[in-house]
């Protein structure tokens, strides 16, 4: 189906929203897979994790039935929609089901936004079916102008609706998923890689730590909670080569709420990382978090792809309540 005339807006806004949600929009001061806030306040001492140099596997590196990796790469590329079409399609669906009052935030009448969108869809399915990108852009601008809509603000509103919709979908996945406990949970992937989690420390933070000196990386307060999670990774004898534990155990998130209001990942004295693991061996590391006092008693989770060496989306949830009100 022809992408509507607002494609020129959707491509940019969809890419922004999709990338933001897929990365989790990691807030400053919250540890991601590639950075951890320094405990000593020296932002130059932020520890770079192995995710920055993580091994990736292209389709050509996956064995093809006929032994020709080029055939796999070619077939895969042909089957996948372009990022532009994918982003635009998601934006279309979001707009069709979203609360259009978001447009009011950007000075746009929601009814005018809906009329402009519907007119664009009608044009795209009819006269504009074979239009070029330039023609689409001109028509889109003309339709927006007809309803007195600023193109930049229209794009921002769509981006916000997409972000909200994708975040709600992620929350729904978390609530619906069967999970292992954060403390004492374990999981074995089909390749035999085994992950086990155990909480080893919960105590008052005890001090005030401003990690970047200006509050931008987060601040831990004396009555926040120091929470330390140990993770053990075991690699079976049958595993081919060294195992890279860059995705182990996964990032801690709050189930209901925003991470930047609830937790900070820190490279404190209790935090340790692990490197490559040979077949038949086990290594353990520890992740240290500062849990905001107002978030104590809330449920948190980790979505782990630790043993998913095929990057096939084989993840497991670990969930549990941290602290008490």
Image (tube, grey):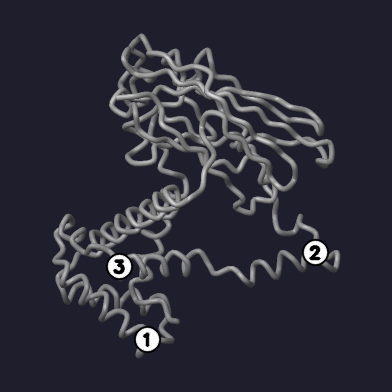
Q: Nearer the viewer, mark 3 or mark 1?
A: 3
**Is residue 39 toward the left or the right of residue 216 in the image?**
right
Q: Which residue is mark 3?
A: 97
Q: Is residue 136 above or below residue 51?
A: below
Q: For residue 296, which quarter of the picture?
A: top left
Spatial separation of the CA atoms under disc 3 and disc 1: 20 Å
Circles 2 and 3 in contact, beta carbons < 8 Å:
no
Tag 2's secondary structure? loop
Q: Nearer the viewer, mark 1 or mark 2?
A: 2
Q: Residue 26: x and y, percent?
A: 42, 38
Question: From the viewer's perspective, is the residue at label 2 or at label 3 nearer?
Answer: 3
- The numbered mark at residue 25 is none
Mark 1 Cα within 10 Å, few/some/many (few <14, many 20+)?
A: some
Closer to the camera in the image, 40 or 318: 318
> Label 2: few (<14), some or many (≥20) within 10 Å?
some
Mark nearer the N terminus (3 vs 1): 3
Q: Residue at x 32, y 29 (%)?
A: 295
Q: Could you say which is closer to the camera, residue 307 or residue 311?
A: 307
Q: Which residue is mark 1?
A: 125
């Amino acid at each position: 189906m022809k992408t509507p005339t607002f494609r020129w807006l959707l491509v940019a806004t969809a890419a922004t929203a999709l990338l933001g949600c897929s990365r989790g929009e990691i807030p400053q001061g919250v540890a991601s897979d590639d950075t951890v806030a320094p405990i000593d306040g020296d932002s130059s001492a932020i520890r770079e994790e192995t995710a920055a140099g993580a091994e990736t596997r292209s389709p050509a590196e996956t064995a093809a039935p006929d032994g020709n990796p080029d055939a796999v790469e070619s077939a895969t590329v042909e089957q996948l929609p372009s990022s532009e079409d994918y982003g635009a399609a998601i934006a279309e669906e979001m707009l069709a089901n979203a609360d259009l009052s978001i447009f009011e935030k950007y000075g746009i009448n929601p009814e005018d936004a809906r009329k402009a969108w519907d007119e664009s869809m009608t044009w795209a399915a009819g006269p504009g079916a074979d239009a070029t990108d330039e023609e689409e852009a001109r028509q889109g601008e003309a339709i927006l102008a007809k309803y007195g809509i600023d193109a930049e603000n229209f794009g921002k509103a769509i981006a916000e609706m997409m972000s909200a919709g994708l975040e709600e979908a992620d929350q729904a996945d978390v609530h619906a998923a069967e999970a292992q406990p954060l403390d004492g949970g374990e999981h074995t992937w089909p390749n035999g890689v085994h992950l086990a989690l155990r909480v080893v420390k919960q105590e008052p933070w005890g001090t005030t730590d401003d990690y970047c000196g200006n509050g931008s990386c987060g601040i831990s307060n004396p009555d926040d909670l120091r929470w330390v999670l140990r993770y053990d990774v075991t690699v079976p004898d049958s595993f081919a080569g060294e195992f890279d534990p860059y995705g182990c155990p996964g990032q801690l998130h709050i189930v209901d709420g925003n991470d930047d209001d609830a937790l900070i990942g820190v490279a404190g004295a209790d935090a340790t990382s692990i490197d490559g693991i040979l077949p038949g061996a086990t290594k353990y590391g520890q992740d240290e978090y500062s849990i905001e006092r107002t978030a104590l008693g809330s449920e948190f989770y980790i979505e782990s792809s630790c043993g998913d060496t095929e990057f096939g989306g084989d993840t497991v949830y670990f969930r549990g309540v941290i602290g008490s009100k």
